[in-house]
Image (cartoon, rainbow, N blue to C red):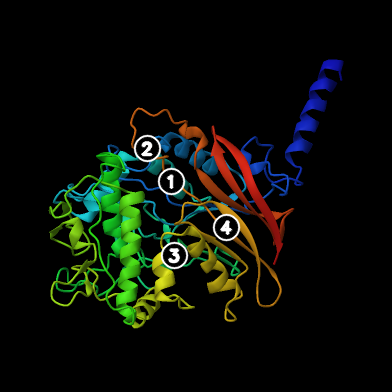
């Protein structure tokens, strides 16, 4: 055998031995999901959680426009990963809430048509997600949030054919709790079921909209959209008419006054607008609502007859009995007090604490890891359950753009928001997990926080 033949033979032997090496089931990859220091990076074992994408049907007012290309890039990383086993979209993916008041959301068409338009508007994102689904290597799970609580399972399937949908009680129910495969001690949900403004609201306005379940937060979102599409200054904004609590011994009146104070704060300090509050501007035609309402139709007022606090819409929500029934309808396990829930709707801390209250401090729960979206406030917090075991709460943040009323403002959107949670076994120990919170900064995975937990 010549020297040249020996060299060629040696190369072939080396190639054959290398190709038969079973110590690593995947080739070396520079995919950021496949190079984690905590993981063995050998098999599909990682869970990616994102939420609050807020993909609207019209980029002139949608909440996520500047981040779309980065979201596409991120999802392509998920798709090409050799070690991600599941992508979970934890609510508020689609959005028929954040629509300026005077716009007819469905434009006289159906919800299915609205979904098709949203898919086309955000084609780069849906193309990748549907590619992940069709590849059948990574499971894709969708959980409803409040901004997409009204979308039927069939219409979600139009957007993402074959996606796994996690819903509590049938296709019509706009909340969901999800346990990833092989992990009953992990719960992922959107988190809106604990929010007085955003929990499903049955039989609230039967005279106006029989069968409607959209909560007060829907109208809040419609007004909020105006605040940014047709901006004004805080000083020039329309002020909320005064309301007086005239019966402090009436618990329902106290709750209505608490509700009024919250509305006054958000309209004058957060989402101020220049609209005439008496003008019918809120075009509905969604979720069994067919009328056009004024802002004053949403706000509390003092009755001219007896001075009590009343409302045109949602007037019957303000007893503890009603709130308890509404919480049970939303499958809340540990019930909350109504006034705390009303004020807590504006406080992310209140929603985040529900993970501890509903799961870790609940003797009927063995859940050790909880992930919410909804608040848009990314975080990881440690807790201890009733058995003294370590528990973790994570919030997956949002992918919406940073909003601004000043259209000329220079905002580096590449450094803002775009968060995700990654759950990965530590060196392939299925019971020892690393829960990490990341920000997608300039297209790179920036670690914000992480904790390990031994299940």
Please tell me whether mark 1 or mark 2 is closer to you in this view: 2
Q: Residue at x 61, y 37 (%)?
A: 31
Q: Position of residue 100 (x, y in %)?
A: 24, 46
Please tell me whether mark 4 or mark 3 is closer to you in this view: 3
User: Where is mark 3, residue-wise?
Assistant: 344
Q: Are marks 2 and 3 in contact (CB under 8 Å)?
A: no
Q: Nearer the viewer, residue 384 or 404?
A: 404
Q: Nearer the viewer, residue 311 or 86?
A: 311
Please tell me whether mark 1 or mark 4 is closer to you in this view: 4
| Figure quadrant of residue 332 | bottom left
Query: Whole-Å distance between the Cαs marked 1 and 2?
Result: 29 Å
User: Where is mark 1, residue-wise?
Assistant: 129
326 relative to 379 in the view: left or right? left
The mark that comes first in sequence, 1 or 4, is: 1
User: Where is mark 4, residue-wise?
Assistant: 394
Q: Secondary structure at mark 2?
A: loop
Please tell me whether mark 4 or mark 2 is closer to you in this view: 2
Q: Are marks 3 and 1 in contact (CB under 8 Å)?
A: no
Q: Position of residue 111 (x, y in %)?
A: 23, 55
* Vertical relation: 389 (above or below) 294: below
The mark that comes first in sequence, 4 or 2, is: 4
Query: Whole-Å distance between the Cαs marked 1 and 4?
Result: 23 Å
Q: Residue at x 70, y 71 (%)?
A: 389
Q: Split into 4 quadrants, where in the image is the C terminus?
A: bottom right
Residue 72 visible (yes or no): yes
Q: Secondary structure at mark 4?
A: strand
């Amino acid at each position: 055998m010549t020297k040249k033949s020996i060299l060629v033979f040696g190369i072939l032997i080396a190639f054959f031995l290398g190709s038969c090496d079973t110590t690593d089931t995947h080739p070396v990859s520079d995919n950021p999901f496949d190079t984690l220091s905590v993981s063995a990076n050998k098999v599909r074992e990682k869970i990616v959680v994102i939420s609050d994408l807020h993909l609207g049907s019209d980029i002139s007012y949608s909440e996520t426009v500047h981040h779309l290309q980065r979201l596409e890039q991120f999802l392509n990383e998920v798709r090409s990963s050799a070690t991600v086993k599941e992508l979970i979209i934890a609510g508020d993916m689609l959005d028929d809430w954040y629509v300026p008041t005077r716009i007819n959301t469905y434009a006289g068409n159906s919800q299915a048509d609205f979904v098709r338009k949203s898919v086309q508007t955000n084609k780069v994102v849906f193309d990748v997600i549907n590619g992940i689904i069709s590849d059948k290597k990574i499971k894709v799970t969708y959980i409803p949030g409040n901004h997409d609580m009204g979308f039927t399972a069939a219409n979600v399937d139009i957007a993402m054919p074959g996606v796994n949908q996690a819903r509590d009680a049938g296709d019509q129910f706009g909340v969901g709790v999800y346990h990833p495969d092989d992990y009953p001690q992990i719960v992922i949900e959107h988190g809106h079921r604990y929010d007085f403004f955003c929990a499903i609201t049955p039989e609230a306005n039967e005279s106006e909209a029989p069968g409607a379940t959209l909560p007060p937060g829907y109208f809040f979102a419609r007004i909020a959209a105006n605040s940014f599409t047709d901006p004004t200054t805080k000083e020039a904004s329309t002020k909320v008419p005064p309301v007086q609590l005239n019966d402090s011994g009436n618990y329902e009146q106290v709750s209505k006054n608490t509700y009024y104070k919250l509305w006054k704060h958000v309209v004058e300090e957060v989402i101020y607008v220049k609209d005439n509050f008496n003008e019918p501007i809120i075009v509905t035609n969604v979720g069994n609502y067919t009328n056009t309402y004024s802002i004053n139709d949403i706000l509390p007022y003092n009755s001219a007859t007896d001075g009590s606090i009343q409302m045109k819409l949602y007037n019957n929500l303000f007893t503890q009995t009603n709130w308890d029934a509404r919480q049970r309808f939303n499958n809340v396990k540990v019930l909350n007090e109504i006034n705390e829930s009303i004020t807590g709707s504006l406080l992310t801390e209140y929603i985040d604490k529900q993970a501890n209250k509903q799961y870790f401090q609940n003797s009927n729960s063995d859940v050790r890891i909880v992930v919410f979206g909804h608040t848009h406030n990314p975080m990881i917090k440690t807790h201890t359950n009733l058995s003294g075991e370590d528990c973790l709460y994570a919030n997956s943040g949002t992918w919406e753009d940073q909003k601004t009323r000043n259209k000329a403002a220079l905002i580096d959107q590449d450094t803002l928001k775009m968060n995700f949670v990654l759950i990965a076994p530590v060196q392939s120990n299925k019971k020892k997990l690393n829960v990490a919170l990341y920000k997608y900064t300039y297209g790179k995975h920036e670690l914000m926080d992480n904790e390990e937990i031994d299940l």
